[in-house]
Amino acid sequence: MKLLGQQNSINVRKVLWTCAELKLTPELEDWGGLTRETCDRDFLAINPKGLVPVLIDDDLVLTESNTICRYLATRERRTDLLPDAPKQRAIVEAWMDWQATDLNTVWREAFMGKVRQHPEFEDADRQLQSVHGWNAAMSSLNMHLMGSGQYVCGDMFTLADIVLALSTNRWELTPMDRPALPAVASWMNRLASRPGFKEYCQNGIP
């Protein structure tokens, strides 16, 4: 098994943390950033989308970080991380989809401008609007966690916790004003003992 990407990528770290939970050790092949660019012809031959991560498992070439996480949990028959029962599985996948769509969309202007300092995201008004939207989304997560139990989908740790904790870590490390969210903070503290949390989530990388 091989994983293409870099450890500074939040989406690559989703997969690495999942692998830590599953006790899998894929070979990490460095792609992305300034080392081996994903617009390289060799990479595009593997993934025409030009994005990391990419998981190669025998003859399977799989893209999209949340899909890779779901595949690995299913492959290893870890129904605690991704339940078999349709209703429980749907709840986990719904929160994973929210992370990949609504949450990832709302932080883009703030993160790319304030952390990555990308020239296309320098507009202060757009950054501020993004900050407000990001804080609102995290406040919604906080409200949910107040009544959900120990974890996002109840009292069992699932893949939803992995992907949302990584997004929360990014929110915590981005230089901006943010509200105090006690339920989010308590949830992150509960995750601190999980395999992979310190190495791939709360490791100083937003």
Image: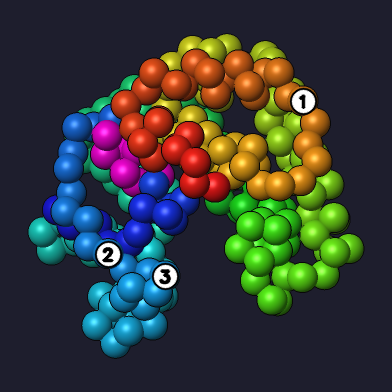
In-image side of 6 versus 161 (left or right): left
Residue behind mark 1: 180
Image height of 107 relative to 82, above or below: below
Residue behind mark 3: 33
- Residue 186 location, x and y as percent? 60, 16
Res. 30 mark: 2
Q: Are marks 3 and 2 in contact (CB under 8 Å)?
A: no
Q: Residue furthest left?
A: 58
Residue situated in front as seen by the camera: 79 or 11: 11
Residue depicted at x 49% and y 30%: 161
Q: How many numbered badges does the structure rendering display? A: 3
Q: Quadrant of residue 142?
A: top right
Q: CA distance from mark 2 to mark 1?
A: 37 Å
Q: Quadrant of residue 195?
A: top left
In-image side of 54 versus 158 (left or right): left
Where disc 3 sits, the SS reads loop
The amino acid type, in three-letter code, at marker 3 is Gly
Magenta stretch: dominant SS? helix
The amino acid type, in three-letter code, at marker 2 is Asp
Where disc 2 sits, the SS reads strand
Q: Residue furthest right?
A: 125
Mark 2 nearby-residue class (10 Å; few <14, some 14–19, many ≥20): some
